[in-house]
Amino acid sequence: MTSQENTSTKDLHILIIEDEILVAENIAKILSKQGDYIFSIAANEKEALKIFKNNPVKLIVSDIHLNNSADGTCIVKKIQGEHWVPVIYISAYTDKSFLDAALETEPVVYLVKPFLERQLLVAFSIALNKIEKFEMDNAVAKPSSRELQIIALLTRGFNSRDIGNILFLSEHTIKTQRKNLLKKFDVASTYELIALAARLKWVKNE
């Protein structure tokens, strides 16, 4: 099931993983009220992975339990292993084991069947915000190796003199590079730079 593309919606491609075709079509129908999106429906793992491979999927709406196939969380984990995609789970299962498996994929929300149309639309709005934030973050150019070294040392609490000694550079050079980093990434302070680095995972937490 495919809707016409619309540049105002950034050609959002939504993958619905659901083995009950009527349920899948109803989900697509509800979400279509919010915009002119592109929908693909998969009833099993093979179909889902094929669609993901051949299309720029930006959102997944998935059931948990699929007949004669791996459960939805397993499929989502494989997809997210390639790159991050937000997921909305819709399932009749509320057992702790299912919930724990779903939480590992950091879902936008877990809706229990039968769900209300408004519940799905609210979850969809949250997902759109996550997608927009993710795309904005990834539009930021990654620092150079030297810049990453400086940011990592700032994260660990070192000052410009300390960093200069560690990297065999002058304190003046480090101060200049710090100013350039603030300007390059449009942040007002070292604190904001460190927060940005943590959010975009430029440095590892120790």
Image (tube, helix red, strand yellow):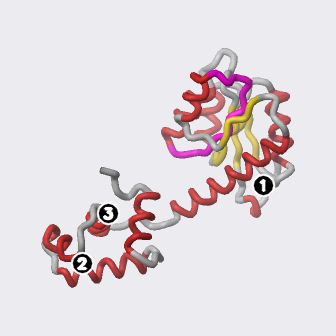
Q: Which residue is mark 3?
A: 155
Residue flagged by tag 1: what amino acid is it?
Glu
Residue flagged by tag 2: what amino acid is it?
Ile
Q: Which picture quadrant has residue 156?
A: bottom left
Q: Which range is magenta? A: 83-95
Whether residue 156 sits left or right of residue 69 in the image: it is: left
**Could you tell me which secondary element the residue under label 3 belongs to?**
helix
**Residue found 35% across the figure and 81% down from its top:** 179
Residue 12 position within the rendered picture, expressed as x and y whole percent measured from the top left: 71, 52
Q: Main secondary structure of the magenta part?
A: loop
Which marked residue is nearer to the observer: mark 3 or mark 2?
3
Q: Which picture quadrant has residue 129?
A: bottom right
Marks 3 and 2 sit apart, C-alpha to C-alpha, by 14 Å
Q: Relative to 43, does residue 37 appear above or below in the rendering?
A: below
Q: Which residue is mark 2?
A: 174
**Residue found 81% across the figure and 38% down from its top:** 27
Residue 197 position within the rendered picture, expressed as x and y whole percent measured from the top left: 41, 62
Q: Looking at this view, is 32 or 149 the one in front?
A: 149
Question: Badge 1 local density, few (<14 within 10 Å), some, or many (20+)?
Answer: some
